[in-house]
Structures are given as C-alpha cells and as structure tokens.
Image (tube, coloured by chain):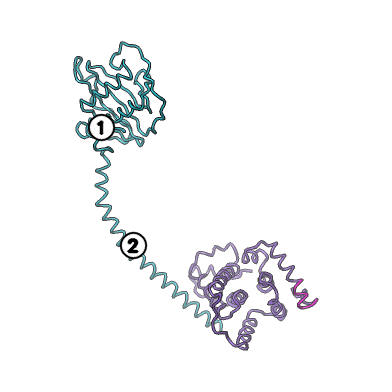
Chain colours: A cyan, B purple
Amino acid sequence: MRELKDYTAELHRRIEETQAQQRRTRRRIAALCVPLVLALAVTGAVTLPKLARRGGKTAEPQSAFSQAGEARAEGVLDPGGAIEPDLHPEQDYPEGDHSPSVMVFVTGKNGTSSAAMLPSEQAAQVCALVQSVDPAVFDPTEGPSDGVEGTEVDPPAVEEVVQIQLSGPGGQTAAYTLEGMELVRDGTGERFALTQAQYDELTALIGTN
Amino acid sequence: MDNGASSYRRFLDGDESAVDEIMEELFFPLVFFVNRYVGDLPAAEDVAMEAMTDLFVHKHRYNFKVSLKTYLFMLGKSRALNWRKRSRGLREAELTEAEDLSEQGELERRALASERKRVVNEALAKLPEEMRMAVHLVFFEELSYEEAAKIMKKNPKQVDNLLYRAKKALRSILGEEGEQLL
C-alpha cells in the first residue's frame, strides 16, 4: 500500500480531471444546442406568421358558411365572447316583399366568434327548412306550435353555439339557437326537434357540419 | 463525533486543506470497508478513490442529514456493488499469496488500531456477508445502529439481530472469549 499523501495527491488529480471533463461536456452540449436553437428560431420566424394568418379563417373552405364569411362577413373575430353584427335585420330590411336572408353566428368553445350571411339560395333553403319545423317562424300572430317530432337520435357532441337569424320574405325575423338536434326559438324558448335528415341538411347549408 | 462534517463544510466554503483532513480520517477505513465487498485490495482502493472523488466533485449531493462517514460509506458500498457486478467472471492477474497477505496486513494495520479488533477481523471472514458488514460498521467503524442500518439499507432492529447472531457465531469460532470481544 502507498502512503496517504500519495492517495491524497491522486484524489486531487482525479477531482481536477473530472471537473475538466464536466466542463468539456458542457461546452460540447452548448456547441450542439446553439445551432439547434438558431434553426428553431429561424423556423419559428418563418412559420408563425403563416400560422397566425391561417388562424383567422374558419375550418372548411368549401362550405357555404366559410364562403359567405369570406365574401360578406359582417362581424369581426372577438376572442372575448359573442359579437353583435352590424346588420340588424329588423332595422335594415324595410317591410314588404324581399328575398329571405339568413345570418349565422357561431361562438366557439374557446370564445372566438364569427358571423356570416348566407347566399340567397341557401338562405331560402334554410328558411324553408325552419318553416317546416316551425310553421309560425315568420308569423308572429300565430301561437306556438308543436315541434316536429323526429326519430330519437343521439345528437352529436356540440362544441360551439350556433345561432341563426332569419329574415322572411315579408320582412319578419326570427332567431333560433341550434342546441343539439333542436332549434330553440329566441324570445319564446320553444324547442323544435329536428330529424337526423333535417339536422344534416341544416348544418350542411349553414356550414357547421 | 463529527466524522468529517465540519471539514466538509470548510471545503464547501473553499478551504482545500479540508480535503486532506477528510482523506486522513476516512480513506483507509473506507478502503477496508469496501474491501469486504470486493475482496481485492487494489480494486478496493480504486473504488474508494472513486467514492472520494464523487464526494468532492458533486459538492451539494451531501445534505448533512447523516454523518459524512455514513454518507461516504453508502457511496463506497454502492460503487463496490457496481464493481462486483461489472467484474463478475473477469479476473485480473492475481497477486501472489504472499504479496496479497502482506498488502492485507498493511491495510489492517492502518485501519485497525487495536489488537482486539484484529482478532475479530480474522474471524469475520468465516461469517456470512451481512453479519460481517454489520460487525464491521458497528464494531470497527463505531457507527451507531441507525447509521449502520442506513448503509446496509435495513432497519436498526435488523442490524441488532445480525449483531446478536454474529456474536453467537464468533463464540463458536473463537470460543467463549470471542463473544466478549464484541
């Protein structure tokens, strides 16, 4: 066995070697990380603006809703909650004969909102569909009617609130909220159940399927 | 009994001479302890040196909750078991028996101050490993049952049982006087 001082000297040497090795390893890691961080920064700088631009658009470019939204959206995105459109059907449409029109408001689960006016052909179809479910849609003098009973179908999971404002040929207006497979009339709270076919058709027309 | 804790605090404060003090106090006992696991003196020195290096390089792993000696012995045991796992089946060229005994004797001389301990040490080789370790830590290194238990990863009661059985075994090896030595 050696003397204690020899072991102590060896210990000091090993400590220095180990610490030098640790410094080399840290430098090597830093040398690898710096190009990686730079590459990530450049990639982020290029792709994030693109993602931000895409984030303002709705999901399906082919749907009537998004087409209408691109062409004639009246509202603006507001992360804070639902928005009021600039267009008020009761005020802006004079009484008398005119084409039916439909405004669709969608408030997403995360609070983002969007609004769009449907093209006239689709608006007419939506009005016809709603009238088949609620015949009193454009007749404020008629009492509440029973909702259309369809077959029991499990409604799809609803992630967003869809409101539909209809303006009829005579200038009458009505607003509904689509809750599951039911249309709930604003103001009276009457509920009108949709059949699966009616639901599919409506969501296809307003572009929220 | 400080067992090096105050020296280690001075080392953490930047006093490099504390390293020499800790070496003087704990290195040979550590080698002696590690040698019980590895059974090879040069390897035991190497393992003990690694444990010491660990202690001084990774400065803030020791949190002073146990004595420095206990912590160092835990390090030594862990490294000794790793060495044993790695070297199973590998054997370096062995020293001649005479050289080996001479080195062993020198280690014992440095680690064991009293004749009483030397007598017990000779008999320990015949005991099972766990009993040997318990005797070594409590009798030779004068650690408490709690500290020995921490190193052996047992509870103090188990250490007590091991020592009780070790005494009985030593009695049969060394006679009536053997039991009294502990």
Q: Is B175 a magenta residue?
A: yes
Q: Position of residue B19 (x, y in %)?
A: 52, 74
Q: Residues within 10 Å of mark 1 (few under 14, many from 20)?
A: many
Q: Is residue A38 above or below residue A83?
A: below
**Which picture quadrant has residue A75?**
top left
B110 in relation to A167, above or below: below
Q: Are marks 2 and 1 on the same chain?
A: yes
Residue designated by label 2: A33
- Sequence-wise first label, 2 or 1: 2
Does B4 appear above or below A81? below
Instruction: Give the camera-side residue of A207 and B139.
Output: A207
Alpha carbon distance from label 2 to label 1: 46 Å
Amino acid tagged 1: Phe
Q: Looking at the image, which residue is at 65% across and 64% down?
A: B149
> Can residue A65 be seen?
yes
Q: Which residues are magenta?
A: B168-176
Q: Quadrant of the N terminus of chain A?
A: bottom right
